[in-house]
């Protein structure tokens, strides 16, 4: 990654070395055990906080370490060196839970909710998806009815990363009428009476991240937990999606990178018909194609991240980057398993996990199909806008 001086400087390099050492010492030796268990220990949050990882990208006044978008990208890339997208998704669930609060919340809310999370003392998660409203966010049904100084919340959320253990849930609720204008955001604490959680959901991939369904039964949430004002929730969710989709693209690229590296290593070791399989043209060409796609996807993602870092709207471009990265990831992981042959079907080999983990990347944060709708809408909107000039 040091080959990209236009995006990374010395501070990024120092951070990369630090996070890589943390990953090698505190995560990599235990990943297989955590994957089989379906969860990593809560102590990892405090360890990551002490190492300065959780606070990257957050203001110092709330306990953060500061830094730009590329400092956060460095953290995600190096954490992904552990080979478990589930560990990274769970450990970094704060990065989709806290940004709406940072952007829309009051100073009192920020000081109350953010520091304990950055210290690794509390776990935060984002609650948007519902059993009947996944990509169709504007149709969510969890209702928050105002009663005096409280909101009475009823409904449920599903497929929530860190949902089993979250202490604070940044929750999309309906406070108004139908459609996106009726959506607001509430900070709901798991200690609230009426708040309950399912058993961890069994998933195809990302085994080490706890994922759950959350239920609200007459939950009385203080009015001061409303983020911003009523009706601002959809705006907060949509702006948050840009960052979430960016980091899903980064995770896709790193999943691809690991699959490529494992394939190169295996091809240089494995022998068939009296020679290493790296000497067969078909294998060499497969690896060439894989490497080309990974490089193209990473550069595209970095370029979009650079513009986001400069405050340039990238709704269309980040949708493209996420789709391209997840599609590359699908192909590269599939080819990696193929290169490994029967070994690629075995859980003792990393490519088997990467292959399973890759599927969620074209679904989470907005499906591949929804991304294409956003891209095409922006294209045609731009054409109409140009014709009016």
Image: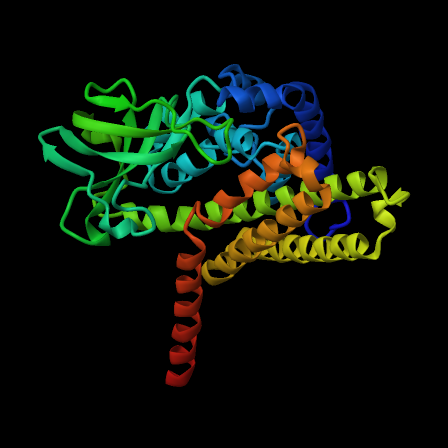
Please state the horizontal and vertical placement of residue 179, each as a whole percent of the image.
20, 54
Q: Which quadrant, please, contains the C terminus? A: bottom left
Please state the horizontal and vertical placement of residue 260, each as a whole percent of the image.
72, 45
Asked which quadrant contains residue 337, the reply is top right
How many labels, in total? 0
Asked which quadrant contains residue 31, the reply is top right
Looking at the picture, the colour scheme in use is: rainbow
Residue located at (41% from left, 46% from top): 240
Residue located at (37% from left, 84% from top): 388
Q: Is residue 333 left or right of residue 243?
A: right
Residue located at (44% from left, 65% from top): 375
Q: Is 269 drawn above or below residue 137 in the view shown?
A: above
Q: Residue furthest right?
A: 274
Q: Is residue 314 left or right of residue 16?
A: left
Of residue 4 and residue 179, the one placed in the foreground of this image is: 179
Of residue 265 and residue 130, the one placed in the foreground of this image is: 265
Please state the horizontal and vertical placement of residue 209, each as a whole percent of the image.
48, 28
Residue located at (74% from left, 55% from top): 286
Please state the horizontal and vertical placement of residue 100, each as a whole percent of the image.
37, 40
Q: Is residue 138 visible?
A: yes
Q: Residue furthest front?
A: 273
Q: Is residue 294 left or right of residue 96?
A: right
Q: Which quadrant, please, contains the N terminus? A: top right
Q: Is residue 69 visible?
A: no
């Amino acid at each position: 990654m040091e080959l990209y001086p236009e995006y990374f400087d010395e501070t990024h390099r120092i951070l990369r070395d630090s996070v890589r050492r943390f990953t090698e010492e505190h995560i990599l030796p235990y990943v297989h055990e955590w994957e089989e268990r379906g969860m990593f220990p809560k102590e990892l949050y405090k360890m990551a906080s002490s190492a300065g990882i959780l606070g990257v990208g957050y203001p110092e006044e709330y306990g953060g370490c500061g830094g730009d978008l590329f400092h956060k990208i460095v953290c995600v890339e190096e954490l992904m060196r552990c080979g478990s997208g589930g560990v990274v998704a769970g450990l970094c669930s704060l990065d989709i839970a806290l940004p709406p609060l940072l952007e829309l919340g009051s100073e009192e809310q920020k000081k109350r909710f953010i520091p304990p999370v950055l210290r690794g003392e509390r776990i935060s998660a984002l609650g948007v998806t519902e059993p009947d409203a996944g990509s169709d966010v504007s149709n969510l049904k969890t209702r928050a009815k105002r009663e005096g100084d409280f909101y009475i919340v009823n409904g449920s959320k599903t497929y929530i990363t860190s949902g089993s253990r979250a202490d604070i849930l940044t929750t999309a609720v309906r406070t108004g009428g139908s459609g996106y204008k009726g959506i607001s955001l509430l900070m709901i604490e798991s200690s609230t009476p009426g708040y309950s959680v399912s058993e961890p959901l069994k998933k195809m991939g990302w085994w080490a991240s706890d994922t759950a369904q959350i239920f609200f039964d007459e939950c009385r949430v203080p009015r001061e937990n409303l983020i911003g004002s009523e009706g601002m929730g959809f705006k907060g969710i949509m702006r948050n999606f840009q960052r979430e989709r960016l980091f899903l693209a980064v995770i896709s690229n790193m999943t691809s990178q690991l699959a490529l590296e494992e394939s190169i290593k295996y091809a240089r070791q494995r022998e068939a018909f009296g020679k290493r399989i790296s000497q067969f043209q078909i294998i060499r060409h497969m690896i060439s194609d894989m490497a080309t796609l990974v490089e193209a996807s990473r550069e595209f993602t970095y370029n979009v991240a650079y513009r986001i870092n400069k405050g340039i709207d990238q709704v269309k471009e980040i949708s493209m980057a996420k789709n391209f990265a997840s599609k590359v990831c699908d192909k590269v992981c599939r080819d990696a398993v193929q290169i490994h042959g029967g070994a690629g079907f075995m859980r003792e080999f990393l490519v088997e996990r990467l292959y399973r983990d890759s599927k969620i990347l074209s679904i989470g944060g907005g499906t591949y199909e929804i991304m294409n709708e956003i891209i095409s809408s922006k294209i045609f909107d731009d054409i109409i806008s140009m014709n009016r000039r």
